[in-house]
Image (cartoon, rainbow, N blue to C red):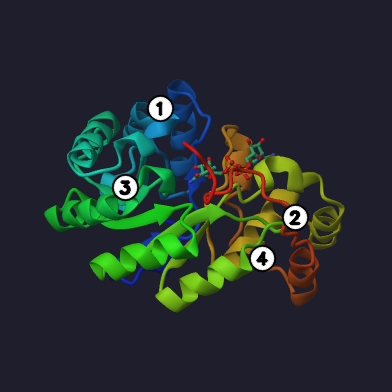
Amino acid sequence: MSDQPHISFPDGRSIPQVGLGVWQTPNDTAVTAVRAALENGYRHIDTAAIYENEEGVGEGIRASGVARGDIFLTTKLWNDDQGTDSVFRAIDRSLKKLGTDYVDLYLIHWPSPQRGKYRETWKTLVRLRDEGRVRSIGVSNFAAEHLEAIVGDSGVTPVLNQIELHPDFQQKALRAVHDRLGIRTQSWSPLGQGHLLANGVVGDVARRLGRTPAQVIIRWHIQNGLIVIPKSVTPSRIAENFKLFDFELDAAAMQALDSLDDAGARIGPDPMTAAF
Ligand code: NAD
């Protein structure tokens, strides 16, 4: 087991800081990607019901030979399943597909505020956690007002909020809210879905340090205390994206990436207006 960094949760558990993301990865590809990741030292996999690859993720875990107990596995509740009974049915389906009897982390995928159900859904996740089918519970794409509402209702703080975050979209205001509430931040699309790999500032840092652009960006997330889930299905890139623990970005490199922040650089939907 590699001595990779972990981030501790307020609930007493912890998560490996770097994981593999498997969005837009069909089942058969997920098997090989997850297996390659685990063979290269990753111990954290991020999937979701809506990715329709939970079977492949489960198969990749079993094919790797790594013990289930050594792996941190996250899946997410899709918006159509928000509520109470529907959440119990959804987690049963996910666990069956994954071939495991618990997940380490269960997330509400989007607040989907127009449905008016995320507060009820959060209370249901608290029940699931108390029953042991999920170890930790959190959210994704929640804005400050959604976080305040669920914490106010239940007194239970999500361990993390998984949000779009990359060097040119740094979400500083929401991260400050997380810090105030004791919520960890997890970066989705940490490489900007690949577009940042060709960025000139990133390229200059990578050349100076003798690392690849992907490694430089993932290090930036790590050194900011963020939990990070880069995606690749290519075994050589999966390996590259985990060769992170024998170097550091110096202050000049951190500053160079910090300077890329641009409030207009969001790639995905705005959670406040996303109507799905
Ligand atoms: P990403 O920022 O991780 O970029 C992935 C792309 O970058 C790959 O498809 C590949 O083209 C390229 N890439 C990766 N490593 C590379 C390397 N070493 N060299 C060259 N190119 C490389 O994008 P993502 O998949 O959108 O985000 C990562 C994960 O975040 C997803 O797989 C998913 O698990 C999660 N996610 C969650 C949400 C959410 O709503 N919660 C939304 C989007 C993504």
> Is the CB of mark 4 within 8 Å of ligand 1?
no
Residue wearing tag 2: 211
**Sequence-first disc among 1 and 3:** 1
- The residue positioned farthest toward the top in the image shown: 28
Task: Identify which residue, 207 or 50, lies in the foreground.
Answer: 50
Q: What amino acid type should be assigned to the residue bearing mark 3?
A: Lys
Tell me whether the residue at label 4 lies in contact with that at label 2, contact meaning CB atoms closer than 8 angstroms: yes
Residue at position x 36%, y 48% in the image? 108
Task: Identify which residue, 94 or 205, lies in the foreground.
Answer: 94
Give the number of the mark in front: 4 or 1: 1
**Sequence-first disc among 4 and 1:** 1
Q: Which mark is residue 247?
A: 4
**Sequence-first disc among 2 and 3:** 3
- Image height of 121 relative to 234, above or below: below
**Sequence-first disc among 4 and 2:** 2
Q: Secondary structure at mark 1?
A: loop
Estimate the spatial distance between the alpha carbons at disc 2 and disc 3, rounded to whole Å. Answer: 45 Å
Q: Which mark is residue 52?
A: 1
Residue 266: x %, y % from top left: 67, 50
Give the number of the mark in front: 2 or 3: 3
Estimate the spatial distance between the alpha carbons at disc 4 and disc 1, rounded to whole Å. Answer: 36 Å
Q: What amino acid type should be assigned to the residue bearing mark 2?
A: Arg
How would you rate the neighbour count of disc 2 (Cα within 10 Å): few for under 14, some for 14-19, many for 20 or more?
some
Q: What amino acid type should be assigned to the residue bearing mark 1?
A: Glu
Residue wearing tag 3: 117
Whether residue 41 sits left or right of residue 159 in the image: it is right
